[in-house]
Image (cartoon, helix red, strand yellow):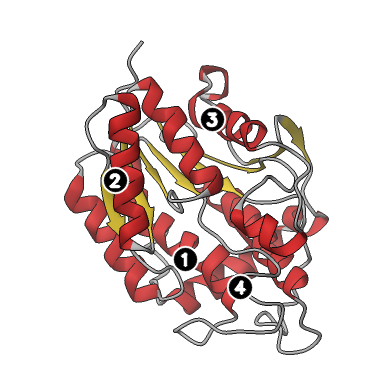
């Protein structure tokens, strides 16, 4: 059966995002691919067209380290399509090389991993949520991690005690918590929102640059992510966190309603969204 859905994948030029794009192209899905490097983005779109003999995926360019570019990305997606069935929020940076182990900031002067891994996805989700709701039933899939670290709301930008892995873990927990919050605000009949740890240390550029070897295969990560994107059995499943294909509990802070509301309010302020814009 040909997949007639339109699917946006962020971070689609390498690793899991690229491999997932190829898997979905096999189904015939209409793809919109995001990347931050124009040459790699266009090459990825060409490769998918040629490998699967499908229409060339549309492409959208943005550096997620700048919120203005995230807003432009959302506008480009809305201009490219009148429906969006799935948003796969996959783009991100790890806890070490090639993005460094010392504290760095985004173009908006936010801690870099929190900005790229979390705030960009939060803003993009908010900007595209009306389009997703009009395309119901739609899905949001957040590619998070089992590596999570509680958020210190008194030092959310980690100006004290910084490590790359702490920053990475905080950003991934924030991603999961935000997913839970969106699922509480939007009926599952319109949009489901789930997060997952796709696999452990897949052989991606990010992993190989930092630790030099892999544990799980890329195919395992693709299969777990593809399941959340496409499995009919999960049509009504929302507000969950999966370790690969297992429905598991995230860090305890994710189930603290007060912490989730704190994060939601801070995220609205940091991204400049009005309180009504993301719900």
- In the rendered image of this protein, does residue 104 appear above or below residue 46? below
- Residue identifier under label 3: 226
Query: Residue 1: x and y, percent?
Result: 36, 10
**Depth-wise, is mark 2 or mark 1 nearer the camera?**
1
Q: Secondary structure at mark 4?
A: loop
Quadrant location of the C terminus?
bottom left
- Residue identifier under label 2: 131
The local crowd at label 2, few if under 14, some if 14 to 19, many if 20 or more residues have their Cα within 10 Å, is some
Disc 2 to disc 1: CB gap under 8 Å: no
**Depth-wise, is mark 4 or mark 3 nearer the camera?**
4
Q: First in sequence: mark 3 or mark 2?
A: 2
**Depth-wise, is mark 3 or mark 2 nearer the camera?**
3
Residue 64: image quadrant is bottom left
Q: Secondary structure at mark 1?
A: helix
Query: Residue 217: x and y, percent?
Result: 69, 36
Query: Residue 121: x and y, percent?
Result: 48, 59
Q: What is the C-alpha distance between the residues marked 1 and 3?
A: 22 Å
- Residue identifier under label 1: 120
Q: Secondary structure at mark 2?
A: helix
In front here: 236 or 228? 228
Q: Is residue 4 left or right of residue 144?
A: left
Q: What is the C-alpha distance between the residues marked 3 and 2?
A: 21 Å
Q: First in sequence: mark 1 or mark 3?
A: 1
Q: First in sequence: mark 1 or mark 4?
A: 4
- Residue identifier under label 4: 99
């Amino acid at each position: 059966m040909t997949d007639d859905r339109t699917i946006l994948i962020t971070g689609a030029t390498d690793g899991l995002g690229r491999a997932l794009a190829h898997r979905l192209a096999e189904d015939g899905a209409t793809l919109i691919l995001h990347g931050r490097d124009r040459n790699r983005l266009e090459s990825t779109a060409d490769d998918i067209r040629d490998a699967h003999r499908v229409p060339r995926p549309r492409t959208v360019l943005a550096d997620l380290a700048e919120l203005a570019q995230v807003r432009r990305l959302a506008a480009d997606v809305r201009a490219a399509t009148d429906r969006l069935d799935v948003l796969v929020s996959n783009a991100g940076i790890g806890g070490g090389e090639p993005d460094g182990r010392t504290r760095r900031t985004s173009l908006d002067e936010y801690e870099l991993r929190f900005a790229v891994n979390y705030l960009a996805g939060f803003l993009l989700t908010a900007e595209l949520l009306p389009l997703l709701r009009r395309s119901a039933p739609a899905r949001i899939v957040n590619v998070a991690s089992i590596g999570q670290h509680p958020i210190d709301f008194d030092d959310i930008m980690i100006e004290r005690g910084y490590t790359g892995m702490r920053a990475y873990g905080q950003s991934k927990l924030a991603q999961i918590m935000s997913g839970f919050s969106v699922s509480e605000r939007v009926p599952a009949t319109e949009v489901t929102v789930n997060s997952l740890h796709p696999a452990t240390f897949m052989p991606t550029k990010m992993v190989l640059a930092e630790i030099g070897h892999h544990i799980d295969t890329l195919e395992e990560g693709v299969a777990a992510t593809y399941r959340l994107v496409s499995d009919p059995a999960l049509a009504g499943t929302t507000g969950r966190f999966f370790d690969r294909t297992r429905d598991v509990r995230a860090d305890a802070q994710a189930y603290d309603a007060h912490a989730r509301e704190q994060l939601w309010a801070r995220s609205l302020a940091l991204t400049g969204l009005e309180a009504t814009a993301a719900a």
